[in-house]
Image (tube, rainbow, N blue to C red):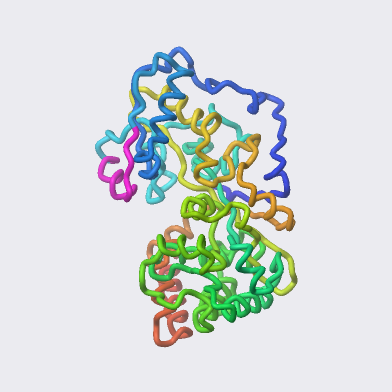
Amino acid sequence: MKPVVTMITKTIMACAISFAASNVANAEVTDGIDKALVQGSITFYTNRTDLVESGVYKRYENEFKELYPKVTEVKVVGFADYQGGIRPRMNTGDYGDLVLILPSVPSEQYKNFYEPLNNLYRSDQVYFYDAWENDGKAYGISMGNSVEGLVYNKQVLKNAGVHVPIKTLSDFFDAAEKIKANGKIPLYINFGAQWPLQQWDKFPLIAEGNDSVYEKMLKQDKPFSGETSYHKSLSVLKKLIDDGLTEKDLMTNSWEDSKNSFAKGDAAMYYLGTWVIPQVIERGADSNNIGFMPMPSNESGELNAQMNHDWGYAVSKFSKNKETAKAYLKFLIEKSDFEKIAGFIPTLKSKKPSLEQLKEYMSYNPKVIQTPVNSSTFIAVTNRSKIDFYSGGYIQDVITSGDFNKALEKLDSRWERAKKRVMK
């Protein structure tokens, strides 16, 4: 599986891509499917329980039925713990028609669970086309994408005398000190909630300036304690905490409260993705008062940014109504307002992002790097080392340990043992 390496410039905002083979911008939702077979009922299993409860998916069902009158039902079932809810069903063959690809399913097993989707889109039409690819077949389509950066309260920064964009790490710490001196929380990291700490598994990529950081760890003797991008990332986090530039009560799971703090102006910044912007607006933040800029990662002033995909839509291999499931997938990608509600960059390259904050973000001309697809070797070493990347658990352990440097050295030891086992 080849890593995705695509540097995207302001085309994210322009999104004016013309396709020689088919005009996707004006395409009917039936492209790539047999319209005559779009009928009956399907079941869609999703992680967005909030959209199920709010009636958004019911609205989508009605809109989809207007396009396809022979469709009788789109049953949408939400799981707060999606992996926990879907995984037991995978071995039964009864897991609905449209699903989200589980990260725990190895790419070589995609063919056992999912239907190839190469006929729906080409690689030049959607972002992250090969994120769920195996043996030349694409099994997943990203439900949406986001870029990472500093979501900030404009008034809080202005009151503290902070000017944007912040281009260097030293300027970032200076800005945080000014905000702290003004009685506000500089950066809400949500340490206690744990999962937001995954940002510090993302920071190494922008610190590295390219997509090679993870694969390089397979060749580094000390990926965590040496002079590496991972060491830099965890050191930045530790300095923020040691200098009192984050929330004071670290161990409380305060994710929901943090959004209120940001909306009220008690907190200045998040280091998160575009998806958080609609959530803080829901909590009362004025959209015009929300800014978004790349996270500084060096002293050169060169801004790097990471673009991620979210979950991947897939059609069950065992679905009895695959054409209707494919048509609904294309409806969600092409015709729905899902990416606007979720705060995503659309997966379809010809669709213009709706978030105003993205215009500011891209005006700073960052080098945008798509998150790479990790090699099977990297995944095997990760599993063997039991270092839970992108979950925040191991980062909590490192930061709360009595000896930061020794904790990093222990990670190096675990990683080295795993490498020797896997890379014999």
Report whether residue 42 is seen: yes
The C terminus sits in image quarter: bottom left
Residue displayed at 38% across by 35% down? 55
How many dots with numbers? 0
In the image, which residues are magenta?
76-90
Report whether residue 381 is seen: no
Main SS type for the magenta part?
helix
Q: Toward which corner of the image does residue 44 lie, by quadrant?
A: top left
Q: Position of residue 124 (x, y in %)?
A: 65, 36
Residue 275 vertical position relative to residue 271 in the rendered view, above or below: above
Residue 397 vertical position relative to residue 326 in the rendered view, above or below: below
Residue displayed at 43% across by 70% down? 191
Residue 359 vs residue 197, the one in the foreground: 359
Residue 81 vs residue 37, the one in the foreground: 81
Residue 116 vs residue 40, the one in the foreground: 40
Residue 148 vertical position relative to residue 310 in the rendered view, above or below: below
Q: Position of residue 92 (x, y in %)?
A: 24, 37
Is 114 a magenta residue?
no
Drawn side of residue 194 relative to residue 79, left or right? right
Is 83 a magenta residue?
yes
Q: Position of residue 165 (x, y in %)?
A: 71, 65
Residue displayed at 30% across by 46% down? 87
Q: Toward which corner of the image does residue 410 lie, by quadrant?
A: bottom left
Drawn side of residue 93 relative to residue 36, left or right? left
Q: Position of residue 295 (x, y in %)?
A: 63, 65
Q: Residue most toward the bottom?
A: 403
